[in-house]
Image (cartoon, rainbow, N blue to C red):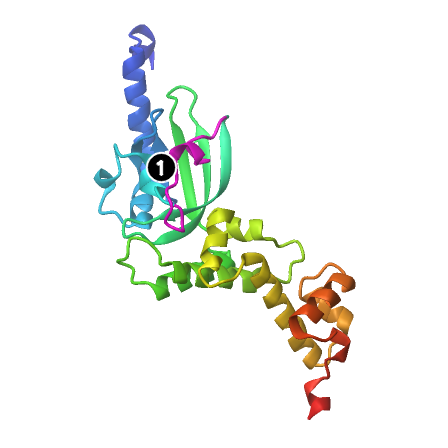
């Protein structure tokens, strides 16, 4: 330490030393980590990140553009401009959020990410973890993977719709669940969402409403009260529920007879 006091190293050498130390720490971390340089390229990538994203080694990543390596395209296949990326465009010391990262093979993986800016170097440390506890995202991802060969670089539109339906079936009972929430869950734009359902002559809002009403109808057939069916199927009030139900089935919910009574 005394030697360092009497013979101070130059700023350039300090930065080199800092980066070497940071590389050692990052490399041994058990969670996926990498360091993004001020210009947006990957400076360091640890073994956990390399493995998570399906690359051979850190040489496949270091020096490459961080944004494009993580998600050059959105989940629906449309281009994802770097200037819209919350990771690259984050301002301030620390940020976090949820995104879909793409593996080397093109498979989407839902992650929770966080960043921390390093004052001295201008670099940013990025950490990310799969949202393993998020059953909705995993079921949607599994449907995407099963519907399309993993070698396909982009998910088919039909496969993506299957993933969207998986999300709707998990979330429809929440009365605050909206088309915007669906787009956020799937990490696509609302416009892309509308286009995907337009392929089959539907709209995302009408599909959410249809699934809610079909669930309510099945509850009524099992003998539940109209008020209970209304609340548990995601409607905010009996009036809007009754009107939507009549439009869908041609009769009010009060006229649904339990299956046992019908038989």
Q: Against 20, is 217 above or below?
A: below
Q: Which residue is drawn at the image coordinates 48% and 59% (left, top)?
A: 197
Is residue 47 left or right of 99 when viewed as pictured?
A: left
Q: Which residue is mark 1?
A: 67
Which region shows up in magenta?
A: 74-91
Magenta run includes residue 196: no
Rendering quarter of residue 118:
top left
Q: Against 165, is 109 above or below?
A: above
Q: Main secondary structure of the magenta part?
A: loop
Helix, strand or loop for disc 1:
helix
Q: Position of residue 40 (x, y in %)?
A: 34, 29
Q: Position of residue 90 (x, y in %)?
A: 47, 30
CA neighbours of label 1 inside 10 A, class few (<14), some (14 to 19), many (20+): many
Is residue 194 or residue 16 the one in the foreground?
194
Is residue 214 left or right of 125 when viewed as pictured?
A: right
Is residue 7 or residue 263 the one in the foreground?
263
Q: Which residue is drawn at the image coordinates 29% and 63% (left, top)?
A: 149
Is residue 253 or residue 91 the one in the foreground?
253
Q: Position of residue 154 (x, y in %)?
A: 32, 53
Say whether residue 187 is visible.
no
Is residue 13 or residue 145 the one in the foreground?
145
């Amino acid at each position: 330490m005394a030697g360092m006091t009497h013979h101070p190293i130059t700023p350039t050498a300090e930065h080199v030393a800092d980066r070497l130390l940071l590389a050692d720490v990052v490399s041994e971390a058990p969670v996926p980590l990498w360091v993004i340089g001020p210009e947006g390229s990957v400076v360091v990538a640890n073994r956990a990140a390399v493995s998570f994203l399906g690359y051979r080694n850190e040489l496949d990543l270091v020096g490459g553009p961080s944004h494009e390596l993580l998600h050059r395209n959105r989940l629906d296949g449309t281009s994802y401009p770097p200037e819209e990326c919350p990771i690259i465009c984050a301002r301030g010391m620390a940020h976090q959020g949820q995104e879909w990262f793409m593996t080397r093979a093109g498979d989407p993986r839902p992650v929770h990410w966080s960043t921390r800016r390093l004052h001295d170097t201008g670099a940013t440390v990025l950490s990310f973890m799969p949202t393993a506890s998020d059953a909705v995202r995993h079921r949607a991802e599994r449907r995407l993977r099963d519907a399309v060969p993993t070698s396909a670089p982009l998910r088919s539109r039909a496969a993506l719709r299957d993933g969207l339906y998986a999300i709707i079936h998990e979330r429809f009972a929440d009365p605050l669940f909206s088309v915007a929430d669906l787009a956020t869950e799937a990490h696509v734009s609302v416009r892309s969402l509308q286009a995907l359902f337009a392929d089959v002559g539907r709209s995302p809002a009408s599909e959410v409403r249809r699934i809610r009403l079909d669930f309510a109808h099945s509850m009524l057939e099992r003998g539940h009260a109209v008020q209970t069916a209304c609340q548990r199927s995601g409607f905010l009030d009996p009036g809007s529920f009754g009107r939507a139900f009549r439009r869908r089935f041609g009769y009010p919910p009060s006229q649904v007879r339990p299956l046992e009574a019908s038989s």
